[in-house]
Amino acid sequence: MSLNYAYHSAIAGIGATPFTKDSGRTPMDQAVEACLAACEDAGLPPEKVNGMVTYSAEQNPEIEVARNLGIDELTHFSMVHHGGGAACGVVAVACQAIYSGAADYVLCYRAFNERSWHRFGAGVQDRPAGAEASEVSFSWSSPFGLVTPASWVAMFATRYMHEYGATTEDFGRVSVVDRDFAATNPYAHFFQRPITLEDHQNSRWIVEPLRLLDCCQETDGAQALLVTTAERAKDLKQKPAVIASATQGVAEDQHMMRSYYRETITGIPEMGLCARQLYQSSGLSADDIQTAIIYDHFTPLVLPQLEEFGFCERGEAKDFIRDGHLGRDGRLPINTNGGQLGEAYIHGLNGIAEGVRQIRGTSVNQIDNVENMLATAGTAVPTSALILSQPR
Amino acid sequence: MSDEMTDEQKEAFVAKLRREVGSTGTPTVARDPVNQPMIRHWCDAMEDANPLYTEPDAASQGPHGEVVAPPAMLNAWTMIGLVPRVNDPKDPASGVYAMLDKAGYVGVVATNSEHVYHRYLKLGDHLTGTVKLVDVSEEKQTALGIGHFVTTETEYLDQNGGHVGSMFFRILKFRPGTGRTASSGDDTSNERPPRPRPSRNQDTDFFWQGSRVGELRIQKCLNCGYLQHPPGTRCPACGSTDMGYVVASGKGTLYSYVVSHHPRVPSFDYPLNIGLVELEEGVRLVTNITDCDADQLKVGMPLQAWHMQTHEDVSIPVFRPARAPRNPSTLTFDEVSVGDELPLCPIPLTPTLIVSTAIASRDYQDVHHNRDMALKKGSEDIFMNILTSSGLSARYISDWAGPDAVFKNLKIRLGAPNYPYDCMTMSGSVTAKRESDDEDIVEVSFRGQNSRGPHVTGTVELALARK
């Protein structure tokens, strides 16, 4: 299998609303603002957009966003399943639509008030509800109180610590890196508020072994990306961030956040599948990546992602992190926007926007000589990933 | 009633209660000599399988050379029994109890028992116990109610006048309905909404039906035997759609776990132990780990399933620490180090356990077997008697140390009562080692915790042989 659309498309525009804890606006209003901002960033009149891709948990239908944007015709529209796991998946689907000719300019967006309208971290206390398979699956966890995303991830974390000797301090070091980058990003919620490892260790338990400072924020806000061919992007306002490759992955015995029944649960095989596909189709390897957005809804699953992408050996992410490789002067600075712990939690889409800025050379925490950057999507769910590259 | 008493009257009442402090009562001769049937009842009720207590062949090889009584039975032999029911009125302790009963302090709970064993009792030994009234406390407000602590000390002699042991004993006599928790309505367990109800369909119904009848059912391919959980509609191994189930043994180990603190769903108690259990049949499932503290959870710990009813028509399989098998050989002094932890041991508190152990220890206080009387005397239900708390503690220690470990003493203090349908989980650790010319002693501290808190805390000293 090869991904024929490698290097074919590019992200030509990015746009976002302010990231807040109480927007005072509807998510629809924010979705429209972010989409308009992405078009404006690219210098593209919004009515030229003829494709829209969203991902599940999105409550702002593309037809309403299109109406508000003044888009008359859409020739591609789709919703990718599995929430944050689809953050790069929407870009992959946009690439596929563009490569196939189904659309020319595709908007991907995420907008919500998941802090002020409902607390996303509260989980699925109201499920299971019905007898459909999607509901019945919660019967294997909710009656026992395993109802929140933090608790689903924590189960992997305990086993990972047991097998590889990682500690909660190693998780904390990820959090410290995120907050260090957030401290110098005026767009981040935690601008000018770095933390120490001690702060992390002193923060309260949410679900052991996860503390408060291992958990991403809940945010009100919106982010949009505009995707088109790399060729067309050249004629637009910004330097194109070429999509070297973008892919999705589901692996054997996959469950939603609770793939606990595999032979081992210390790896993320669906992310390993994404890594294989990205590297194979782009011709790149871990050595070619200068910076990355590693999905950080909860810090523990950053570690196996580093292993799946070959930045370190299996079980050795803790050593890679202890050696300081994720920070400003490290081998692989990650989450230079502050990540979802430090900047905002827009289900990964704000991280891809930061990747675009790193390619353009406009990040507030710009890394030197970025040729290629990696972005990953939500872990423990069916997931996705992409590599952005300099235009050739 | 004492709440109508003035301070002066109270003072006079305490003085009256204390009149006999320091005096001893008439010696009580055991109704029967130490005998095998009573020992067997005790061992059956306590589930104590130490062969030194019941099997002559094994006992002849042991440190005593013959069958001996479980040391914790010490005060069972001279218990007054069901008939005659009346205590000797001249006995100073009985006199105090009677005065307290008359004044409305009809509730009774034992709070401390400290056995010292000079030698193990053999079949045919005939005991005499002499009770000395040691202390009567001022009136105290306790969780159970307003009352007085009465402390006694009993010396046990054998048929030859030899000292075989002694017991320091304290009970609380209290007025029902005067406790700090009585009718304060802070027990919210009844107001708690039920847990999320598992939804089910034709593919998964067998699992929940199983839990309802106490079976942990795991889907099995009837063609190739492959087991899978959560269940599916088709075998991923061979493709067969001929699916059935096996009833799992319920034995498993903890593969991973979390302790949930936040957010708090009203249906659950927090912190909440949630485990991923690997069954001995090979599959895993998410469940709760009950009857142990969060800090007692360890990956790899052995677990046993039980079924918790959550709705009128729903039960769910949950797990508690597995009872460690009895150690058939005996630890030597050198094998034990200070800091060693004893394995956890859950003791499900069935009504049968509470009643049968009370009777086996010849404790016919109605609060241990008669629910109506227990309620009337200020208790929520029948509750475990203190001899049983001693006996189960001794069983726990002996199952770890081995049959030939010799108990030198057994000191316990009681807290939260052991009511039926709860579970008490024993834990313990070696807290001291002491060598001398004639004996090498190991001290173990232990605790038995139920859902309300620690029921029993205590220490025991064991003599262990050197290798």
Image (cartoon, rainbow, N blue to C red):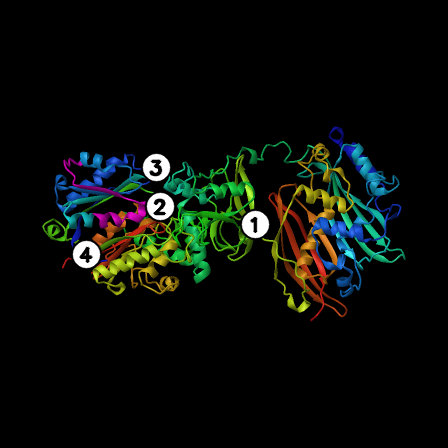
CA gap, disc 2 and disc 1: 35 Å
Q: How packed is label 4: few (under 14 Cα within 10 Å), some, or many (20 or more)?
A: many
Please name which of the two marks, 3 or 4, marks the residue nearer to the observer. 4
Which chain hosts label 2? A
Q: How packed is label 1: few (under 14 Cα within 10 Å), some, or many (20 or more)?
A: many
Q: Which quadrant holds residue A160? A: bottom left
Q: Is residue A76 magenta?
A: yes
Q: How packed is label 3: few (under 14 Cα within 10 Å), some, or many (20 or more)?
A: some
Which chain hosts label 3? A
Q: Are marks 2 and 1 on the same chain?
A: no
Q: Are marks 1 and 3 on the same chain?
A: no
Q: Secondary structure at mark 3?
A: loop
Residue A116: mark in rendering: 3
Q: Is residue A282 visible?
A: yes
The N terminus of chain B: image quadrant? top right
Q: Which residue has dot 4 on it? A: A6
Query: In this picture, which residue range is highlighted in magenta?
Result: A69-93
Of A163 and B124, which appears nearest the observer? B124
Q: Which residue has dot 1 on it? A: B320
